[in-house]
Image: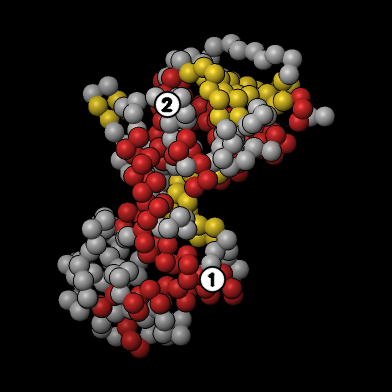
Amino acid sequence: WNVFTTTGIESRKSFAGVMDWQGWAITLGDKFSDGTGERGPGQYDDKFDAAPDIDHGNKKVQQSIAIWLRWLRLDVGFDAWRFDFVKGYGAEYVGLYCKKSHPSWAVGELWLDMRYDDSGLCYDQNEHRQNTINWINATDKESAAFDFTTKGILQEACRNTQYWRLKDSDGKPPGLLGWMPTHAVTFLDNHDTGSTQAHWPFPGDKVLVGYAYLLTHPGIPSIFWDHVCDWGEDCRARIKALLKLRQKAEIKVDAKVKILCADAELYIAEIGEPAALRVALGPRHSEADGAWQMGANGNDYKVWISKSKTS
């Protein structure tokens, strides 16, 4: 981590002096602060003790970050942003930096606590996904967000054979993708939740069931590097088959979802209008009529594609 001080930093060569921040760039009260900052932390600033709390309200900080982002896009060649730990600074600054740097796309990591009671994860997670929507709106919809709501609910459903969780009280998918699919980046795991850190991992024996859900449903699905590159050829081939079905069926980011069944052992949904994919998850047997063709299947999942999409 870069620790900013007022001692000697001004003599260091860097990016044309743009990122030579001193104590003025840190919020007052932070353990790295030297007292020369303009303001304290904002209302929504969560602390992260490993790094200084940067004052994004400071105009020079804003200008520096905007210049750096434009350099990354125009000179280096990056064209999209992933904003880490966005609980640490106001969502309006994410929107500002996007407007200043013009990425093709952006996503924020807003990892919020879900609601639990004595029985475990609560069925109703509307507050959780609404808080994510509030963050997206506060960026002026310049950034999407990782759909932690869907991850939390889906892994609980798969782990405990509780597929009733995958239908909310209004008959819709229960995650962010059920309310704001155009800005919902769905995922099973990342470098924090899974992999070597495994802070909140998706159950390993249900990963393909999870992808059968993500890759058939609306939203912007993402695939974890480990699952494609480190889990072997069979896992990679099965994920690839699901991807091809999504492409062939032309599933859009805001595709309609019709949930036909959501009980403990079976979830069935048809996606698209008219329906282009049909997915069944869970241990209970299910079939489809003659309008459907089997596209992919495995342990506890089946995906059919409409024959109208195969001709």
Mark 1 surroundings: few (<14), some (14-19) or many (≥20) residues within 10 A: some
- Give the Cα separation between the discs numbered 2 and 1: 43 Å
* Image spot of residue 238 (x, y percent): 65, 32
Residue 72 has which mark? Answer: 1
Does residue 249 sit above or below 135 in this rendering?
above
Q: What residue is at 48 percent from the left and 67 percent from the top? A: 99
**Which residue occupies the foreground of this view, 22 or 169?**
169
**Which residue occupies the foreground of this view, 192 or 296?**
296
Residue at image mark 2: 170
Q: Amino acid at mark 2?
A: Asp
Classify the position of the N terminus by image quarter: bottom left
Q: Count of labels shown?
A: 2
Can residue 221 be spotted in the picture? no
Indicate left or right for 58 with 230 as reference. left
**Which residue occupies the foreground of this view, 2 or 124?**
124
Q: What residue is at 54 percent from the left and 64 percent from the top? A: 103
Classify the position of the C terminus by image quarter: top right
Secondary structure under tag 1 reads helix
Q: What residue is at 52 percent from the left and 73 percent from the top? A: 70
Counting residues from the N terminus, which is met first, the one under dot 2 or under dot 1?
A: 1
In the picture as drawn, the residue positioned furthest to the right comes out as: 311
